[in-house]
Amino acid sequence: MTPQHRYLARVLEKQWMDNRNSVRLKSIRDQIRSDLKPINRYNPRIYNGGSYGKKTMIREAFDLDLVIYFPHTDSRSLKEMYTSVYDSLEHAGYKMTPSQVALTLKPPNNPFPKDFHVDVVTGKALDERFDYAYIYDILKESRIRTNLKMHIDNVCEVRDVIKLMKLWIRRHSLNWQTFAMEQTVVRALKNQNTRDLGQCMENVLIYIKSSISQLHLIDPANSNDHIEIPKKIRLAIEQKANHSFKALQNGDWESIVW
């Protein structure tokens, strides 16, 4: 492997979740699942979503996503399903803030940094396979079609590059939504060898600086769901990619990601 790959591999090693934090994270997950016992009579399935489910978590910044799918045979409306989840968590004493599709809560006695939170998403499976589902859009009181398994499989070949890009975003103070970044990385590395992290990062930076201004991304699980990147954020991403690519040409990886 190249020196660039070895350097980036060392960077990733520092971002591995140690056993102590992994145990703490699982404890929080299990406690929330236990507090959701009132909805068990509806036979939901609860999945790990986000970076936890995709295995793209970095030690420096992470949260926890729990996705609840009720069976397609449940006769309640999607809003009623969401309300049952909300009521169960409220009864357990959680303070929650609704975002677009998630209830965001802070666990009591949080052992992690202050910005750590848990997002709980409510959905209804389309059939007995529990692959596709409609998740509840809290703000619009509507539904969004999605496929959690597809999202996880979609990034499995580029997990380490996504972790590095999360660090790149943090190091350069960019406000780039993670899902949009993930899909950009997938697009940049499509049909490419992803073994060498240095080559992968170079290819991603080249793709970003040449394409981000006009890039059109679509949710791989829903062709009607366009992934938005505001123009101002696109410009900031492009500028940082150009700067990083110049550093790369000089072999200065330490100023790109560290």
Image: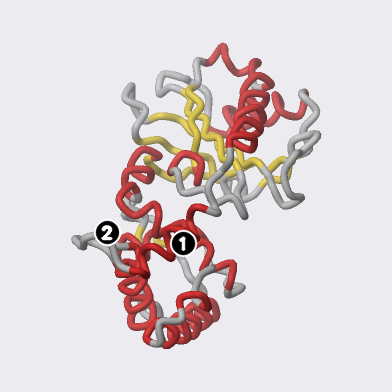
SS type, badge 2: loop
- Give the image location of residue 71, x and y in percent: 43, 22
Task: List the single residue furthest toward the left.
Answer: 191
Amino acid, disc 2: Thr
What residue is rendered at 57% in x and 15% in y? Answer: 40
Q: Which mark is residue 164?
A: 1
The residue labelled by disc 2 is 194
- Position above or below: 15 against 166: above
How far apart in space, not on screen, are marks 2 and 1 (Cα)?
A: 13 Å
**First of labels 2, 1 by sequence position:** 1
Tell me the quarter of the picture where residue 213 sits.
bottom left
Classed neighbour count for the residue bearing mark 1: other residues with Cα under 10 Å, few (<14), some (14–19), many (≥20):
many
Tell me the quarter of the picture where residue 169 sits.
bottom right
Query: Which of 229/163 is in front?
Result: 163
What residue is rendered at 50% in x and 21% in y? Answer: 44
Query: Which of 129/59 is in front?
Result: 59
- Position above or below: 138 against 258: above
Task: List the single residue furthest toward the top.
Answer: 41
What residue is rendered at 76% in x and 38% in y? Answer: 110
- Give the image location of residue 115, x and y in percent: 72, 52
SS type, badge 1: helix
Amino acid, disc 1: Leu
- Give the image location of residue 15, x and y in percent: 54, 52
Query: Which of 90/164 is in front?
Result: 164
